[in-house]
Image (tube, helix red, strand yellow):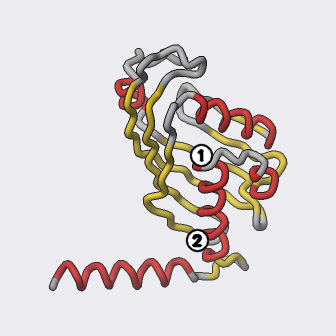
Amino acid sequence: MLKRASTCAVSLLVVALATVNVGGHQSQGHRNQIIKFYDEVWSKGNVAFVDEATTPDIARYGHTVEGTTVGAAAYKEFVSKIRSSFSDYTLTLLDELGVGNKATVTWQLKGNYVGPNKELSPGRAVDLTGKSILFFRGDKIAKEVVEIDDAEYYRQIQLAVPYSE
C-alpha cells in the first residue's frame, strides 16, 4: 500500500512540475522537445534534426576528454562520432525535470564499444548513466552540459583514463 501511495505522489509531482509556467516558458513544451531531440538525434542518429531543435551556436560542454563543441555542425559531427564508436548503441531517457528555460535529463547509454575506427573486436560492453543540463533560448536548445563518471566509462571500455591538465 505504501509503495502504491508513493507512486501516486510521485506521479502527481511529475504532472505538477511538467506543467509549471515560469518566466513565460511552459515546461511541458520543453519536455516534449527534449524527448523528441534525444529520440531523433541520439537514439536514431538523425543528425539533421539538430538544426530543427537547437540554436545555430549550440554549445555542448562534455566531460573531461570530450571537451567543448560549439555550433550545430560540430554537434552533428560529435553525435556521429559517438554513435559510430558503438556497434549497438542505445540511449534511454530515465528522467527529465524542467523549470523555465532549463531542464535536467538523466539518460542511460548501453552498447558494445568498438572504438571510433572499429578497431576493437569483439568490443566492450558499456552500461553508463549520465546527466545533461539543457538551457533553452526560446524553443531551441542553446547549451548542453554533460556529466558522466569518466573513470567508470574508461573502466568499462578498458582504456586508461587520459590525463588532462
Which quarter of the picture shows residue 40? bottom right
Q: Is residue 142 left or right of residue 85?
A: right
As drawn, which residue projects farthest toward the left? 1
- Vertical position of residue 105 compared to residue 78: above or below: below
SS under mark 2: strand
Q: Amino acid at mark 1?
A: Val
- Vertical position of residue 30 compared to residue 70: above or below: below
- The number of numbered discs placed on residues in the rendered structure image is 2
Callouts 1 and 2 close, C-beta under 8 Å = no
Quadrant where the C terminus lies? Answer: top right
Q: Is residue 67 left or right of residue 142?
A: left
SS under mark 1: strand
Compute the Cα span from label 1 to label 2.
Answer: 16 Å
Query: Which residue is tagged 2?
Result: 99
Percent across and percent down for residue 100 are 64, 71
Q: Residues within 10 Å of mark 2 (few under 14, many from 20)?
A: many
Percent across and percent down for residue 20 are 58, 82
Query: Which residue is tagged 1?
Result: 145
Percent across and percent down for residue 69 are 71, 35
- Vertical position of residue 142 compared to residue 27: above or below: above
The tag on residue 24 is none
The residue shown at (67%, 42%) is 60
Q: Amino acid at mark 2?
A: Val
Between 105 and 157, which is closer to the camera in this rendering?
A: 157
The residue shown at (45%, 77%) is 14
- Vertical position of residue 18 compared to residue 161: above or below: below
Which quarter of the picture shows residue 112? top left
Nearer-N-terminus badge (1/2): 2
Quadrant where the N terminus lies? Answer: bottom left
The residue shown at (55%, 25%) is 65
